[in-house]
Image (cartoon, helix red, strand yellow):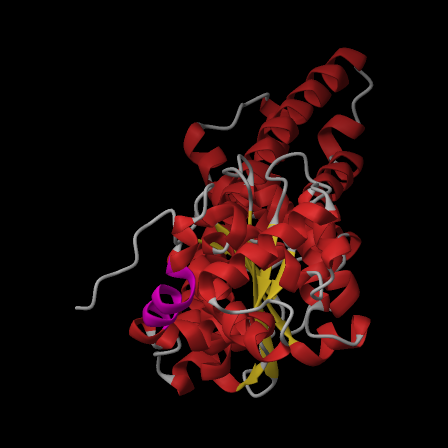
Amino acid sequence: MTARSSRRKDEAATSREAWLVDVAESASHDAGGVPVDLLGDYLPLLADAAVTGRRPKRAELDAVGRLGRQAAQQGISAGRVVQLYLSAARRLWQDLPIVVGSRDSEVVRTAAAAVLSVIDDAVATLAEGYADARRDLVRREEALRREVIDDLLRGDSDLGGLVERAEPFGLDLARVHQVALAAPSERLPDTDAAISALEAVIFDRLGDRDVLVATKEGLLVVLAPAESAQAGGGSSQELGRLMHDELNRLRHGRPWQVTVGRPYPGLYGIARSYEEAREALAMATRLHLDTPVVSAHDLLVYRVLLRDQPAIVDLVAAVLSPLVHSRGGAQPLLDTLDVYFRAGAVATEAAKRLHVSVRTVTYRLARVKTLTGYDPADPEHRFTLQAAVRGAKILNWPVAPLPTPG
């Protein structure tokens, strides 16, 4: 090769390189400033395909896939990256000297087919790499999110570190928060659908700051700022009602039961609210409560009773054990007392709820008085009986025997 021909070849290579740089920069401008680096060797592949018909090698396409991953990691939208590639192809084709200048239609068709084939392969590989990276990012974010939620609910993590980790999720741990739990009647086949439904309605009503929706131990968990929940309906239980209404629209899991912990400030307040909600759910199950939304506040009396089990066992044994000598056993009389108290000590309302006659209710109340010596109609006796009835429900008596002193 002579010095002149070598110089001409270098000049041609330089000219082609400058031309491809111009095409890349114009395409970047078309795509709203997407970095030119994300094109990699895509333009030379197109030019080679147009001139020689060469198909890209697997390694070259893999490089395009890595660029797709890189774009996702940089937070560039998929639409803008694809726009960069399509704009680059359009501009290259318009400015391709050899093909555009040719008058042979067959040459143009062959070159166009080769270029389109490279575009198809490259854009598909680009999108595949982008999607893979997005899935990885989502998995990593979900793992971080789950770790943050677990540490928040446990309440025993390093405060400074947790504040820093919670910040990207929009959580201000200095605010007052409350936690609500939702338990499905059956195992959810699609927890993602339930989470998406809850997030949509809660974000719409309360905003997306200081709100987290997740799953834990088969339950749906919602962490929300208490003042936002109260602003929706004037009560800390508004969050529970909002959750229950939305979840009941789902096909699976009904009927749902939602429990809401009381609002507390700070990191440890979140853990405390969660424990209250979890305890309320366990207690609602134990007491066979069919109330759709249960507030931990409404179950405070049960918590008091549970703290001194020997005392409540003694109360149930001393006050209610004579009911076992009734002809039908203690259960019908116990159920009647429970409904009677919840009906405001109104016999007609209790009869309606029990689906029996008023005469049956008054007869059973009289039997309670005869057997125990406590009159359900007497306000002074009523408190003792009501506390004993609640204690019996907690202990699942008379279905289960009373615990023996340890």
Residue extending farthest left: 406
Q: Position of residue 337 (x, y in %)?
A: 58, 58
In the rendered image, the vertical position of residue 194 relative to residue 390, given as above or below = above
Q: Position of residue 155 (x, y in %)?
A: 40, 77
In the rendered image, the vertical position of residue 120 relative to residue 382, given as above or below = above
Q: Position of residue 329 (x, y in %)?
A: 43, 45
Quarter of the figure that contains the N terminus: top left
In the rendered image, the vertical position of residue 42 relative to residue 209, given as above or below = above
Quarter of the figure that contains the C terminus: bottom left
Q: Is residue 19 visible?
A: no
Q: Nearer the viewer, residue 359 or 293?
A: 359
Magenta span: helix, strand or loop, mainly?
Answer: helix
On screen, residue 72 versus residue 326, left or right, reads: right
Q: Which residues are magenta?
A: 312-321
On screen, residue 325 versus residue 44, left or right, reads: left
The residue depicted at 74 percent of the width and 76 percent of the height is 230
The residue depicted at 45 percent of the width and 50 percent of the height is 330
Residue extending farthest top: 106
Look at the image and say whether residue 314 sits in the magenta stretch: yes
The residue depicted at 74 percent of the width and 26 percent of the height is 99
Q: Nearer the viewer, residue 118 or 175?
A: 175
Look at the image and say whether residue 187 sits in the magenta stretch: no
Q: Nearer the viewer, residue 276 or 225?
A: 276
